[in-house]
Image (tube, coloured by chain):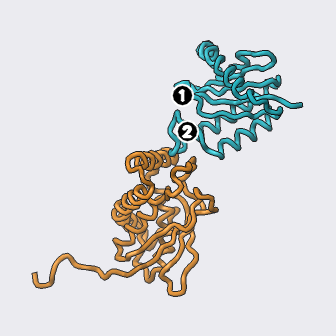
């Protein structure tokens, strides 16, 4: 079954530092903008929810038609990992977030990466896409 | 009473004070990061790292000689072995191997399979010309200069550029005779 999924990482200053379309569905031309728009709209909800729980994984925070937004907020820098998806695989999404979080920490430890700047590493990109195939 | 004869790198490494590996790696990373910001040119950063290494090397050799109990090396081959087997083990905790000797024994390669300096590091496109570990070549150059060997050191392989190991080519330029800081008639 073809799935739609869009993954972004938003820095603490509300700047998107990584974006990837990781779904297997055929791309519609305006899909990317639509996905960004939905994720952007969900940021406010994430902001409110993040302080009500000590868990990093916030589960589904918002929905738009058949698309669901799941979020994961890291403790160290309040970086938000957000995933837009139409599958209902809760465990997979949780594992996906946790592993991407590890990758993100590794990126932060790289001295040539400036925290809060765009993640341009192709290594990171490949790994994220592999994780998406594995879990989503 | 200190033991007589050279001690192995492992034995010295086990006895000296050590710092946490991640702290060490990140501190070095921060230095390189700052140099990149300050100097802007990758070439300049390479030079600066080499100079910093040199300044470390000319001091480090004293500690090395004091702790390792090695005696005077008979030739450059033995020197290279001592650096790889004892020096690197003592200060970095890794063992290096020496290969690729040329015919007259003045040029060889020190190969590092493992290098604690580069944990977590991935070079972005903007710093492709950077020799991230250039400080190491400076250290070796500085240390050898203090024991009257002029050397030239170049990186042949670098894991950060996709090679399978780190390889430092050490080329002996000349043995400097020891100079006394005073004249006979003074």
Q: Colour of chain B?
A: orange
Q: Residue at x 42, y 48 (%)?
A: B31
Q: Dot 2, crowdedness within 10 Å: few (<14), some or many (≥20)? A: some
Residue carrying label 2: A108
Residue B52 can be seen in this image: yes
Report the quarter where the C terminus of chain B lies.
Answer: bottom left
Q: Assign a secondary structure to mark 1.
A: loop
Which residue is outermost to the right?
A1
Place of residue B91 in the rendered image (x, y in percent of width and height, measured from the top left): 46, 59
Q: Pointer 1: what residue? A: A77
Q: Which numbered dot is residue B45?
A: none
Q: Nearer the viewer, residue A102 or A71?
A: A71
Quadrant of image for the N terminus of chain B: bottom left
Residue A26 location in percent, x, y?
83, 33
Q: Which chain is cyan?
A: A
Residue shown at 75% from the left, 38% from the top: A131
Of B1 and B166, nearer the camera is B166
Circles 1, 2 touching at the beta carbon (< 8 Å): yes
Q: Is residue A29 above or below residue B137?
A: above
- For residue A104, what is the image quadrant? top right
Please tell me whether residue B3 is drawn above or below residue A30 in the rendered image. Answer: below
Give the total of numbered labels. 2
Q: Chain of mark 1?
A: A
Read off the chain for label 2: A
Percent across and percent down for residue A81 are 65, 28
Left or right of residue B121: residue A6: right
Circle 2 — which element?
helix
């Amino acid at each position: 079954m073809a799935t739609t999924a869009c993954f972004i990482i938003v820095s603490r200053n509300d700047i998107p530092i990584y974006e990837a379309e990781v779904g297997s569905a055929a791309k519609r031309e305006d899909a990317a903008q639509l996905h960004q728009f939905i994720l952007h709209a969900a940021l406010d909800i994430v902001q409110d929810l993040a302080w009500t729980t000590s868990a990093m994984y916030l589960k589904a925070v918002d929905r738009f038609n058949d698309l669901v937004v799941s979020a994961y907020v890291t403790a160290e820098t309040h970086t938000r990992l957000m995933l837009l998806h139409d599958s209902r695989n809760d465990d997979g999404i949780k594992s996906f977030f946790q592993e991407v979080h590890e990758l993100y920490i590794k990126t932060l430890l790289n001295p040539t990466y400036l925290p809060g700047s765009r993640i341009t590493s192709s290594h990171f990109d490949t790994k994220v896409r592999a994780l998406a195939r594995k879990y989503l | 009473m200190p033991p007589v004869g050279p001690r192995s790198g492992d034995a010295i490494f086990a006895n000296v004070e050590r710092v946490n590996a991640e702290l060490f790696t990140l501190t070095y990373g921060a230095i390189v990061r700052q140099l990149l910001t300050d100097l802007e040119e990758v070439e300049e950063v390479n030079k600066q790292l080499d100079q910093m290494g040199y300044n470390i090397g000319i001091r480090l050799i004293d500690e090395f000689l004091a702790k390792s109990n090695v005696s005077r090396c008979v030739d450059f081959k033995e020197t290279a072995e001592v650096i790889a087997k004892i020096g690197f083990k003592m200060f970095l905790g890794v063992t290096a191997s020496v290969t690729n000797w040329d015919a007259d024994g003045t040029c060889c390669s020190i190969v590092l399979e493992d290098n604690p300096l580069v944990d977590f590091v991935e070079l972005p496109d903007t710093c492709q010309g950077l020799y991230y570990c250039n400080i190491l070549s400076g250290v070796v150059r500085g240390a050898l200069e203090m024991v009257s060997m002029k050397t030239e050191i170049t990186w042949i392989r670098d894991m950060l550029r996709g090679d399978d190991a780190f390889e430092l080519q050490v080329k002996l330029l000349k043995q400097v005779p020891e100079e006394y800081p005073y004249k006979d008639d003074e």
